Image: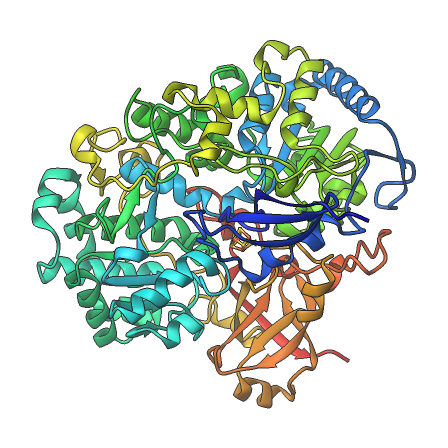
Amino acid sequence: MITTSEIKKGWCGPCHVRCGMLVHFENGRAVKVQGDPDNRINRGALCRRGQLILEHLYNVSRLNYPLRRSGLRGEGKFQQLTWDQAMDEIAEKLSSLRDRYGAETLALSRGTHRTYGWAMKRFLNLFGSPNMTGPNTICMCPSHTVEWSTYGSFARQDIGNARCIVIWGYQPSQSYVVTDWRDLLAAKSRGAKIIVVDPRRTKEAEMADIWLQVRPGTDVAIMLGWLKIIISENLYDTSFVEKWTIGFDQLKKHLDGYSLSELSRLSWIPEDKLCASARMYAETKPSTITWGLGIDLQGVNAMQAVRARCILRAITGNLDIAGGEILGAFGGDPRLISNVQLELNDAISPEQKKKQLGAGEYGLFGFPGWDMIREASDKPGAWFTPPQSEMTCCAHQRHVLHAITTGRPYPVKAFITQSNNTLVQAADTKAVYRALSSENLELTVAMDYYQTPTGLFADYLLPAACTLERSDFPASPKAMEPLYQRRDDYQFWRELGIRLGQAEYWPWKTIEEVCDYRLAPIGITFSQMLRGGGPPPSRNHKKFEIQGFGTPSGKVEIYSSIFANLGLEPLPVYREPVESPEGNPELAQDYPLILIATGKFMPFYHSELRQISSAIQEQPDPIADIHPQTARNLGISSNDWVWIETLRGKIKQRARLTDEVHPAMLRAQHGWWFPSKPAADPSLHGLWESTSNILCPVTADYCNPEVGGWPHTALLCKTYKAG
Ligand code: SF4
């Protein structure tokens, strides 16, 4: 038999990096992948997750055909139907629900921004509902909102050119191995200074010049300390501050309210270390502070820490310079059609915007704040563009689930998830379960790669194409046509939109046609872009010197006018975490350990890839890190199953004894469920056994007032041997 072989370009999707791949086919079947050496992002490298992508592509558990529920919700019984049948029935139901309850009765829940979020938002805006929700509130998007409020764009660390790198609440050795981790190792060898702020002694901490073992949830205290030291010792960039910021004098006065000794006590960082690290950061040029998910997940202090991080970058003169933080990384060439333009955010009426669930409580993250940010940053031809509303203009998840369960303030009768396993993603798992199993819901749809605990409650379960089977803008080609009846989500939203009267807004039949449309202003097609190796790196610096910053004042707003207008603290403040030995000593008697419930680890990504057998062989059980001394005191040995309990409930993970964690802390892994365990409710693939979100609260007192982000860290727990 003659074997036909070919190599095609494709791209990797199990995380956000979008590494380029070369996919080797034999007789039409993909047999091997390797990193694309011509790709500017990964330069030929692939991480362990990426190496496993063919096990994802051909996995026997993948959803391959549209399914309609044939049993009870949660029972896991489905029957196959055609795409046309599924789309007709979903559209008919949505139309009838809109007639009876108004468009706001539909809520969409999206995953982690690796599908076509703009298409989802375009559909929703045209449908007339303001209720897009998902993990946005705790995952990067809040940083976007705050950074746009402060300097009109999102800033990306330039580790490759920095002489001092501050790794803050971030572990690139576990999350971004082929980019930031590679750059960090190179930076270390060329003699760059490294400061790590992390409660755990990570690999990064071990290679740092200074490691600050912060008390979880108090990072803003360190940042306020750094600001005090940098200003009092005149280590800031006076000319940048004078020319490009507003509110510096107010900040100086505001900082008088904090003493270094108090900030040191709050953060558990000795004063001399606070001073040494602040000086190292400010005196080494250029310096960069990374974005880190560890900050976004802190609950009450999260957004104040992001504000303080923005101000540190600005007053040290590191914004938009090589080796500092590059602005507009997501904006690209201003002539291209942006995601936010594609979202059609003016298609939804002002009356419908006002109905956005949770926006009255968390205005910055809803239309009230987003509209202000857009007005300041929407300047034709400018280097900055508004943030995507799909990411930063959301209904709060707690409010959406409450509306489903109670019908208040109005009924949410339809819930569509797009690559979002809400039951594992959201805090307060019991509340999610109550909502998804509620008889109030008249339509639930889940489009995903696999059947998940969330998908078990869907009326329609639809098979999604993975990144090897679909293209994306600006230069990510599909390596092959989708297998079986999998479809890309652009097709889903377009087909649904056309059936609901939106045909004129969906003129492009394929995602490749959309890419052509987006590239047209620079005179090339998608295939020409691919042949040319993708867009040139946008590394132009000091763009603000041309048009200023995309804020109301055109400057970096140290004193944020948007925050002030929304009744939020316009200068960064410290708040004691709701659960802490300092703030709640009585609770700490019963729950003595500080819980970090956010642990990410290779080769998994959030709750994904649990079906990949090679990955499960490498990491079969959920792991909780406990200090050996603490374990000894509690009679826990290495590898024991232990209960981890908070006021909300308890989960089981295996103990790993390690002095990487502080004796007063416990670090639990995040995102666990078990596809091999029985599907039907109450098992739900072992949902209730080890999912760390069961331990996390989402009530208003635990959420920050800016965006409503709930804590996955800075909580109190106890641990004991499972029987
Ligand atoms: S970092 Fe790893 S998982 Fe992420 S896109 Fe690259 S190879 Fe894939």
Most extreme residue toward the front is 2
In which image quadrant can residue 198 be found?
A: bottom left
Residue 548 placed where, x, y %? 20, 31
Residue 419 placed where, x, y %? 65, 41
52 and 523: which one is in front? 523
431 and 551: which one is in front? 551
Residue 173 placed where, x, y %? 46, 65
Q: How is the image coloured?
A: rainbow
Q: Is residue 331 above or below residue 31?
A: above
Q: Is residue 588 above or below residue 72?
A: below
In this picture, residue 165 sits left or right of residue 475: left
Count of marks placed on residues: 0
Residue for point 59% across, 90% down:
632
Residue for point 40% across, 31% down:
369
Classify the position of the C terminus by image quarter: bottom right
Residue 354 seen in the current view: no
In which image quadrant can residue 209 be found?
A: bottom left
Residue 127 seen in the current view: yes
In this picture, residue 193 sits left or right of residue 330: left
Residue for point 53% across, 29% down:
118
Q: Is residue 271 above or below residue 123?
A: below
140 and 527: which one is in front? 527
Residue 309 placed where, x, y %? 30, 52
In this picture, residue 310 sits left or right of residue 108: left
88 and 459: which one is in front? 88
